[in-house]
Image (cartoon, helix red, strand yellow):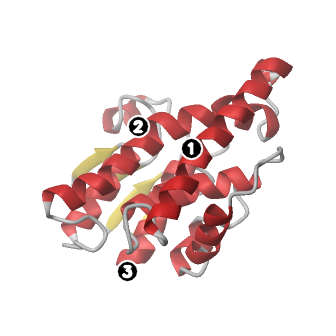
């Protein structure tokens, strides 16, 4: 059975948990991270030298980096609907997954730490204003993409890209800040919320 190391409140752990629901995969979860078992131990760092969650263990095979874990599991289960095998179609899915990890994640960092985590290190009003503006600007890019596809991030069908972008969309809606009206994003969020995996792990009240 798969083992997932990481606490359920982590947005990156929730990517893997949501995907396991989509795939119908049984798994054991061990909570690691702040408030739970420490990742700052030699034993955990032997699994992931970054001391971060999630970590996947599949019959002795150890994998870290949440998007890579999602790609691995979709490939392992031969789910071409979630991660296409055709190079161009696959590249479209992976492009948005990578954009979420590198661009969208960075855009929300200051605002999220200030408004949700209430971090004393993120209390500068001007930096917060810039952070909110940057986050909203990136979500407007999601709006434009959804307006083109009419349904999901990479096209007409649900893919891995929607798990990672869907979790980011949930975080955007859950953070107490001024947001522009993005009707395609709102419809997308409601569409995702109909999926059992999203209800369990994507829009369950945790930002």
> In the figure, residue 92 lies in which quadrant?
bottom left
Numbered disc 3: secondary structure: loop
Distance from Cα at disc 3 to Cα at disc 2: 27 Å
- Tell me whether circle 3 and circle 2 mark residues in contact (CB < 8 Å): no
Q: Which residue is mark 2?
A: 44
Numbered disc 2: secondary structure: helix
Residue at 53 percent of width and 54 percent of height: 144
Q: Position of residue 37 (x, y in %)?
A: 56, 44
Q: Nearer the viewer, mark 1 or mark 3?
A: 3
Residue at 61 percent of width and 56 percent of height: 169
Viewer-nearest residue: 166 or 154: 154
Q: Position of residue 202 (x, y in %)?
A: 59, 65
Distance from Cα at disc 2 to Cα at disc 1: 10 Å
Q: Which residue is mark 1?
A: 37
Q: Residue furthest left?
A: 86
> In the figure, residue 24 lies in which quadrant?
bottom left
- Tell me whether circle 1 and circle 3 mark residues in contact (CB < 8 Å): no
Residue at 49 percent of width and 71 percent of height: 150
Q: Which residue is mark 3?
A: 24
Counting other residues with Cα less than 10 Å from the Cα at mark 2, is it few (<14), some (14-19), or many (20 or more)?
some
Viewer-nearest residue: 21 or 60: 21
Please indicate, yes or no, whether residue 140 appears anywhere in the rendered image: yes
- Tell me whether circle 2 and circle 1 mark residues in contact (CB < 8 Å): yes
Q: Indicate which disc, 2 or 1, sits on the residue closer to the N terminus.
A: 1
Q: Indicate which disc, 3 or 2, sits on the residue closer to the N terminus.
A: 3
Relative to 39, say whether 18 is above or below. Answer: below
Counting other residues with Cα less than 10 Å from the Cα at mark 3, is it few (<14), some (14-19), or many (20 or more)?
few
Distance from Cα at disc 1 to Cα at disc 3: 27 Å
Q: Position of residue 66 (x, y in %)?
A: 40, 48
């Amino acid at each position: 059975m798969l083992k997932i190391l990481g606490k359920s409140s982590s947005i990156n752990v929730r990517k893997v948990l949501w995907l396991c629901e989509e795939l119908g995969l049984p798994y054991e979860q061990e909570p690691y991270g702040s408030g739970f078992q420490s990742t700052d131990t030699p034993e955990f760092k032997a699994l992931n030298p970054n001391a971060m969650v999630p970590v996947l263990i599949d019959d002795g095979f150890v994998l870290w980096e949440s998007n890579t874990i999602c790609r691995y599991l979709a490939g392992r289960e031969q789910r071409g609907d979630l991660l296409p095998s055709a190079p161009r179609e696959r590249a479209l899915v992976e492009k948005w997954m990578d954009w979420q990890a590198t661009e969208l994640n960075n855009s929300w960092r200051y605002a999220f730490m200030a408004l949700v985590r209430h971090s004393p290190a993120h209390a500068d009003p001007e930096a917060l204003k810039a952070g909110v503006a940057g986050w909203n600007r990136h979500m407007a890019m999601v709006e434009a993409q959804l307006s083109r596809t009419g349904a999901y991030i990479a096209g007409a069908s649900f893919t891995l890209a929607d798990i990672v972008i869907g979790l980011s969309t949930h975080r955007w809606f859950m953070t107490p800040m001024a947001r522009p009206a993005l009707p395609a994003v709102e419809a997308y969020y409601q569409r995702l919320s109909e999926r059992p995996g999203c209800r369990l792990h994507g829009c369950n009240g945790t930002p």
